[in-house]
Image: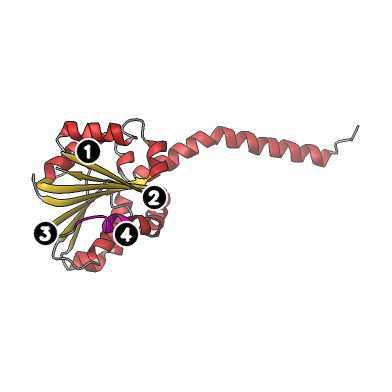
Amino acid sequence: MMKITKRKKITLIILGGIIGLSFILYKPLINYLSEQAANPRGIIGEITTKIWSSYFEDLSKWTISNTELSDVTHVLDIGYGGGSNVKNLAELNKNWTIYGVDISEESYKTATNLNKKAINNGKVKLSIQDVALMNYPADFFNIVYAIQTHMYWDNPQKGFEEIYRVMSQDGVLIVSSEKDKIDYHMDEYKTTATLTLLLKEIGFREVVEKEKEKWVLYTIRK
């Protein structure tokens, strides 16, 4: 039988402790990261929003490319995160005003810094608000974007009801996301069928799904 030295015993104890601690901390860590994704805050939140600025660039551009942008005056970006979608919209140089809401102060700071010029020119107006309780007038926005965000809302039904309220009569809501994020974070409305049922109960008249590899996009008409 191979003799275990004192050094090996210590190594095994330390390794066992690390493995045990990993199991203990795994769920709290996952929960913490999920909370940060939903509402970035503190130094980790600041880092998260800056990562988002580049990470969601391609998803944002694909989403915008699948949107009809004629006769648009007011655009709303729900959960603007790091501000990359706002930036991509502003760079189109359309004759519109882009509004944005997010519940995170860190998102507001990062997105404001990224879109400083457009904000100073009055083309972009960002605020800290909850999607379920916005201070905009009814029938105001021609297009509303919700990119990689609806799976983090506390109450998706109330969020979509409030979006319905602020959309113009011929307005369009664009919801897009990585499919695996929806599967992981949502308990309800994670399938096209259940989401469509909810949206039509609220009053939306049409929901069209489009997929591209790991992404999904819904074009939703009032």
Tag 1: Cα neighbours inside 10 Å, few (<14), some, or many (≥20)?
some
**Residue at 64% across / 36% down in the picture?**
19
The label nearer to you, 1 versus 4, is 4
Q: Amino acid at mark 3?
A: Asp
Pick whichever of labels 4 and 3 is earlier in the sequence: 4
Mark 1 or 4, nearer chain start? 4
Q: Which residue was labeled with disc 1?
A: 159
Tell me the mark number nearer the camera, choosing from 1 and 3: 3
What number is the disc on residue 71?
Answer: 3
Q: List x then y, in percent, for residue 183.
A: 40, 37
Left or right of residue 218: residue 23:
right
Give the alpha-carbon distance from disc 1 to disc 2, as whole Å. 23 Å
Q: Indicate left or right for 95 with 81 as reference.
A: left
Instruction: Say which mark, if any, is on residue 45.
Output: 2
Residue 61: give its label: 4
Q: Secondary structure at mark 2?
A: helix
Comparing 42 with 146, the one in front is 146
Magenta-tinted stretch: 62-68
What kind of element bears circle 3?
loop
